[in-house]
Image: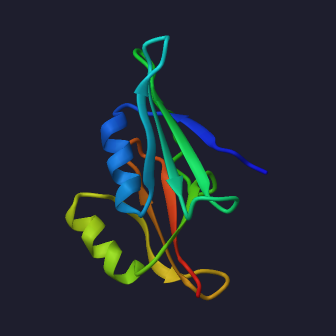
Amino acid sequence: MLKHVSFVTRDLAATLAFYVRLGGVVEKDLTTAEGYRRGVVRLGQDGAGAGRLQFFEVPGESPAPRAHWAEHVAVHVRGLRGLLPTLREAGVTVSRDLQPSPGGRDMAFVLDPDGRQVELLEQGP
């Protein structure tokens, strides 16, 4: 079972705030013994079904996300049709506008503060 996926970020505070806006919960925001800022966001309900993203702000290092959506983080959200305009108003870049997913649910792609592609998929019942 997957525990978490880690990424480098330029700005930990902005990245954590972005994922909280998508419904995530910050579980950790601390400084490591090496002096790196570290944050962990839980996506989904606590328990076996919850996924976690871990971010490190490392002096002198920058994230290198791909521009193409083939590499992305996928997040279930509720109320995507209402959330998308709110994200746009907050300055979030929409890289693929609202459309049906292959399974028929609403889907869109946005960029996180580091330019990482994030798929937003309407959570099913």
Tell me if residue 10 comes above or below residue 82 in the rendering.
above
Q: Nearer the viewer, residue 66 or 84?
A: 84
Q: Residue at x 34, y 60 (%)?
A: 21
Q: Residue at x 32, y 49 (%)?
A: 17
Q: Residue at x 52, y 52 (%)?
A: 42
Q: Nearer the viewer, residue 3 or 82?
A: 3
Position of the C terminus, as image quadrant, is: bottom right
Residue 79 pos. (x, y %): 40, 81
Residue 82 pos. (x, y %): 32, 81
Tell me if residue 107 comes above or below residue 27 in the rendering.
below
Please identify the quarter of the rendering in which residue 16 is found: top left
Residue 124 pos. (x, y %): 59, 84
Q: Nearer the viewer, residue 3 or 58?
A: 3
Outermost residue on the front side: it is 47
Outermost residue on the top side: it is 34
Residue 122 pos. (x, y %): 51, 79
Outermost residue on the right side: it is 1
Asked whether, in this view, residue 74 is left or right of residue 21, the answer is: right
Colour scheme in use: rainbow
Asked whether, in this view, residue 52 is left or right of residue 13, the answer is: right
Q: Residue at x 60, y 80 (%)?
A: 101
Tell me if residue 121 comes above or below residue 7 in the rendering.
below
Number of numbered discs: 0
Tell me if residue 56 comes above or below residue 74 in the rendering.
above
Please identify the quarter of the rendering in which residue 73 is found: bottom right
